[in-house]
């Protein structure tokens, strides 16, 4: 791997990061990856990967991460938090700090993974934190090339954020928002496609500041998802349309639960507002995108296997 530029990566053990790390290693790029230290934790062993123990809260760790790197890919962030202040600290303030340290270390290209929700920062605390993260990245980039990738909904197996959705789909049910939101459109991208986009971006020449919003499927509706799931499952899928008032009540109940138990969840009043606030559309079609049926099959399959095991267990007990 000599001669190839060192890539520093945050969020390397996360949903997208673990796919990207393997992709970069296969391409022959040396990677320095950040991971929280935890007793007994086993980290993936990929060729050319150096692990740095720590998290985004340590300036010393971040300086060590970016030292000697030519490219930084910043994937780490919070999709759930106790409050708006925590979202801002993790997603915005720490991004600004990392960009500043990367610029001071002489990094050539910083890739910041943001979200389509940054288009409308007033929708939710999460959206505000991602919009603020972009502004802090721009303010601290200096003469370093900066790419902001605004990700749409990223789909793939083993994602806690979509576990409930795909568990329901495996049973032939598709929960979806009602009211005006019943006709809203949205973009999605397979985790393999967003990983490929990031790897391509990291290994290509870059200059100045640019923002991209790639998608495997630019304009879908809930009926498109239901029809795709039907093709995968080979049986009908029924849409369960949730009235907006019920969704808002459930979101506020989730917020109250967080205040009581201190355990944040992805589903919140902010997430409900995002679902009810209009179309969420990317602007760039990914070439050779994974077909939606293939993505859904990979996402639903684990829940189908689990259901079959439970059925067999139930029959044995009977």
Image: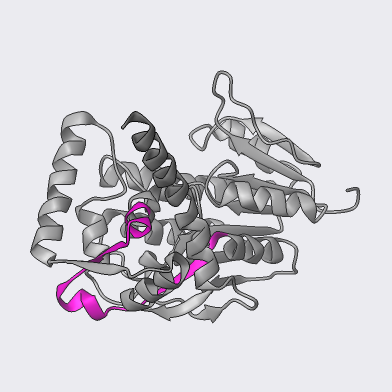
Is residue 230 or residue 113 the one in the foreground? 230
Q: Is residue 306 above or below residue 155?
A: above
The magenta stretch is 167-191
The image position of residue 311, as x and y in percent, is 37, 42
Task: Identify the image quadrant of the C terminus.
Answer: top left
Question: Could you say which quadrant of the image residue 214 lies in?
Answer: bottom right
The image position of residue 95, as x and y in percent, is 49, 49
The image position of residue 93, as x and y in percent, is 42, 46
Is residue 66 or residue 275 the one in the foreground? 275
Q: Is residue 187 above or below residue 158?
A: below
The image position of residue 80, as x and y in percent, is 34, 45
Q: Residue at x 63, y 66 (%)?
A: 197
Residue 22 seen: yes
Q: Residue at x 61, y 61 (%)?
A: 192
Is residue 171 or residue 253 the one in the foreground? 171
Question: Is 202 contained in the magenta span?
Answer: no
């Amino acid at each position: 791997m000599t001669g190839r530029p060192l890539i520093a990566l945050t969020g390397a053990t996360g949903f997208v990061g673990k796919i990207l790390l393997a992709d970069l290693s296969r391409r022959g790029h040396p990677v320095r990856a950040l991971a929280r230290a935890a007793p007994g934790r086993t980290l993936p062993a990929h060729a050319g990967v150096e692990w740095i123990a720590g998290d985004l809260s340590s300036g010393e760790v971040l300086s060590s991460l970016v030292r000697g790197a030519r490219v930084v890919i910043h994937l780490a962030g919070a999709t759930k938090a106790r409050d708006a202040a925590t979202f801002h600290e993790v997603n915005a303030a720490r991004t600004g700090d990392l960009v500043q340290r990367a610029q001071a270390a002489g990094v050539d290209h910083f890739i910041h993974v943001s979200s389509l929700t940054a288009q409308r920062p007033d929708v939710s605390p999460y959206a505000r934190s991602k919009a603020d993260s972009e502004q802090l990245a721009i303010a601290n980039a200096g003469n370093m090339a900066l790419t902001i990738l605004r990700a749409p909904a990223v789909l793939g197996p083993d994602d806690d954020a979509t576990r409930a959705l795909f568990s329901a789909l495996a049973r032939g049910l598709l929960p979806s928002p009602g009211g005006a939101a019943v006709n809203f459109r949205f973009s999605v991208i397979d985790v393999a496609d967003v990983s490929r986009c990031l790897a391509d971006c990291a290994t290509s020449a870059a200059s100045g500041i640019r923002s991209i919003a790639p998608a495997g499927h630019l304009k879908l509706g809930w009926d498109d998802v239901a029809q795709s799931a039907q093709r995968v499952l080979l049986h009908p899928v029924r849409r369960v349309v949730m009235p907006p008032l019920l969704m808002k009540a459930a979101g506020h109940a989730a917020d109250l639960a967080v205040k009581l138990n201190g355990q944040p969840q992805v589903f919140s009043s902010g997430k409900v507002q995002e679902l009810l606030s209009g179309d969420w559309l990317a602007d760039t079609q990914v070439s050779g995108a994974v077909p939606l049926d293939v993505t859904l099959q990979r996402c639903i399959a684990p829940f189908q296997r689990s259901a079959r095991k439970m059925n067999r267990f139930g029959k044995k007990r009977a």
